[in-house]
Image: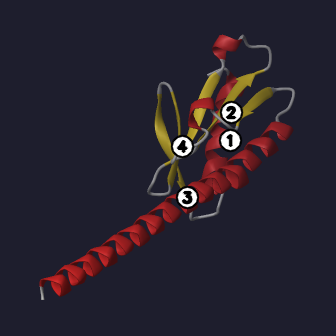
Amino acid sequence: MSKFKEALERGKEAHRQQEKRIRNDKADAQITDFGAQARAWLNDIVVASLEAARAEVAGEVTIYIDTTPRREVKALTPSLRFQIYREGLEKTARKTFTVRVQLSGEASVSSPGMVAEDVGNIGDRSAERFRNLLVKLIEDAAKGA
């Protein structure tokens, strides 16, 4: 009888281990999906908006896009950096902005000395909030602020 109970317990333990592996695999897949979705949002919305703005303001304001920050290449919450500055300004006068995607899906733009501004959720594929902020940042750079 004890051999039967031992076999039953081993079977239960094996079943629990299998369920645990399945849950872990699902969690890993969700994390991978989030990272891919966040990177796609950064490329489709942010980079596309920055490149369009760069073409429109060429000659007056320079927009430099750093799409792969070195230390965050494999980060769970991807980010993107860009600089906006007037033509002819020294490198020290450039202002660097960071677009971050949080685990909640909320995206924000921040810079040293600036309160982070919310630019929407990656689930919302609209670029309107980011473009409005980008226009404000370009105008500030053109004025020399």
| Residue matched to label 2 | 139
Give the foreground label among 3 and 1: 3
Q: CA distance from mark 1 to mark 2?
A: 6 Å
Whether pointer 1 and pointer 4 mark residues with C-beta atoms closer than 8 Å, the reply is: no
- Percent position (x, y) of residue 2? 12, 83
Q: Kindly state the secondary structure of the residue where label 3 is placed.
A: helix
Crowd tier of the residue under label 2, counting other residues whose Cα lies within 10 Å: few below 14, some 14–19, many 20 or above: some
Q: Tell me if residue 142 comes above or below residue 80 in the rendering.
A: above
Upstream in sequence: badge 2 or badge 3? 3
| Residue matched to label 3 | 32
- Image side of residue 18 versus residue 49, left or right: left
- Percent position (x, y) of residue 109? 55, 40
Q: CA distance from mark 2 to mark 4?
A: 32 Å
Amino acid type at circle 2 is: Glu
Amino acid type at circle 3 is: Thr
Q: CA distance from mark 3 to mark 1?
A: 32 Å
Amino acid type at circle 1 is: Val
Q: Quadrant of the C terminus?
A: top right
| Residue matched to label 4 | 75
| Residue matched to label 1 | 135
